[in-house]
Amino acid sequence: MLNYIRAEAYKLLHRPYTYIALGVLLALEALYASMFAFHNSHSLVTPFGAAVVTLVEMGTIGFCICLLIGDIVFAGQYKNSTLKNEVSFGLSRAQIYLGKLIAQTLLSIAYLVVMMAFFIALCAVCLPMEAGTFYSAPEALVIVGYFLAAGLPLWVGAQAALCMCLFLVNGEMASSFFYVGIVFVLEAIFDVAGLLAGGPVGDVLLTICRYFPRNMLDGAKAVVGDWMYLGKAWLVGAFWVVVCTAIGLYGFRKKEIK
Amino acid sequence: MNDNSAVMAAYGLKKAYGGCMALDGVNMQVRRGDVYGLVGRNGAGKTTLMRMATGQSEPTGGELELFGASGKNMRPQRCRTGAMIEIPSFSPFLTAHENLEYYRLQRGIPGKQAVDEVLELVDLADAGKKKFKAFSLGMKQRLGLALALMNHPDFLILDEPINGLDPKGVAEFRQILRSLNRERETTIFISSHILSELSNVATRYGFMEQGRILEEISAEALHDKCRTCLRMEVDDAAKAAAVLQTQLGTDKFEVLPNNVVQLYDCLDDPKRASYALAQNGVALLAMEQKGADLEAYFLNLIGGGRHA
């Protein structure tokens, strides 16, 4: 497994796409931070704390970045028919599947660290530290820290869902649609169905809806510092990882490789 | 069932896609040291059989063995194989060197020089920095072969490996296969539509048609069957045999049923044989010069007229 992850790391580090995608994301962050700097230059004071804390409103973007990460790591294995090179050497399907999932997770964390560090550093350089009536810098960092701690397992859970789609559905575009369907649309369906059904059935459906990663992450914004909720987020993330990986592994085990 | 000398063996192997039987009870053996040439028309099941051997596809019936192991135990044995099935596939955005380095790391092959060595072997040392997407078909074939050889396999599975190679490439490829088979004792399982080329390297053949192996035969036996001869139909085969021995001083003939004698001598002077038989009272009812190459043999085997 270690060899597989080393090989994936080698591929990611030698693929221009990895750097281009990160560069584009960092450029968007720079644009976002420069917007606050522009505000400040026109007497609308947005201090460091206020700018950094807006990150918690962007949790959903993390689920979209999962798509990008999945695309970078999976690297068109079906389109380029490269899975046959791995299977024919005797690597187990589980090793291939889990290797990709781990590589996806590691790249996600690397992207997260770089993007957060870049944005916070940029805000620290460009924006005033005096908080005024806004969050102070330490307060803002605690909020963002809590949000990231709750978000990490949920994003990894979403990565597992994407990994399942990438392995079970031929074609990255189709996989992406399935992923969006599972992470976003299914949640909305449960929500609407719960509201329409009402009664105990509706309650069950609405409860299920609450345990979708995006909803859990949204909930974290309102409960900063709640360790119970944080634990629940990790459990929900773990549940998504286990279930999606089990389904993905089962389906991939018998899949014809072309 | 388990023959230790067999590197790969199939027993009643079946593969169905919907209602279509791609493999319909394949029985065959690739023995240690063989260069096994798999011959068959498009859609005969050659690639399906090779894909099964490499784990890309699962059989729907029968049994497949690799180095004596079957079922789940077969997977670890695949580390001892190298394979190139259909068109070689690599990441288009990586160079040839990077692609091979990726698989070297993945397979845990020690030594960075393994990549350079194998690129040198397939004559791609100068193209190592070129991206795979810019490769010609011939270069892709060479890179596919490089990957198959990188782990010094005991068993090499090659599906149409010389497609797209130029004449120089074909000659080099043949040389590589011969040296692998002779010097490293690599067993090779190869399919090709270029039967003349296959006949240059194969030591054993399997003829496949409609998902079945019609015949397995060694190159020597095939050579004997295909070699040019005078086929003579006489009234008394025993007497004719005696005449050939005493009058022409040859024992290079075979007596077949129905008073048929096949003579492998006097091919440049058939009159000598007919004269000797006539002189000794053997009636020669029919006489023809006969011979076949691999292609003719295969076409005859599957019923003639169709191309491999």
Image: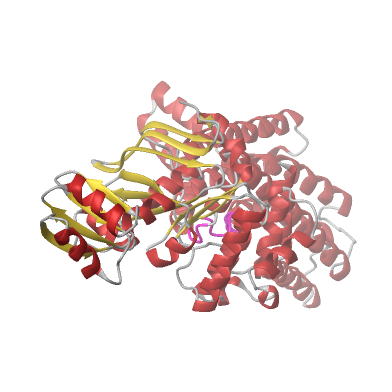
User: Residue at left 33%, top 63%?
Assistant: B293
Residue B258 or residue A143, whichever sits in front: B258
Residue A45: horizontal and vertical position, in percent?
80, 68
Residue B189 or residue A160, whichever sits in front: B189
User: Residue at left 57%, top 53%?
Assistant: A85
Q: Is residue A118 visible?
A: yes
User: Residue at left 62%, top 46%?
Assistant: B154
> Relative to A255, is B46 above or below?
below
| Membership of A72 in magenta stretch | yes
Left or right of B41: which side holds A10?
Answer: right
Left or right of B259: which side holds B156?
Answer: right
Left or right of B275: which side holds A62?
Answer: right
Residue B284: horizontal and vertical position, in percent?
12, 58
> Relative to A128, is B149 above or below?
above
| Membership of A4 in magenta stretch | no
Q: Which residues are magenta?
A: A67-81
Q: Is residue A217 visible?
A: no
Left or right of A125: which side holds B102?
Answer: left
User: Residue at left 73%, top 58%?
Assistant: A10
In the image, farthest residue toward the top: A200
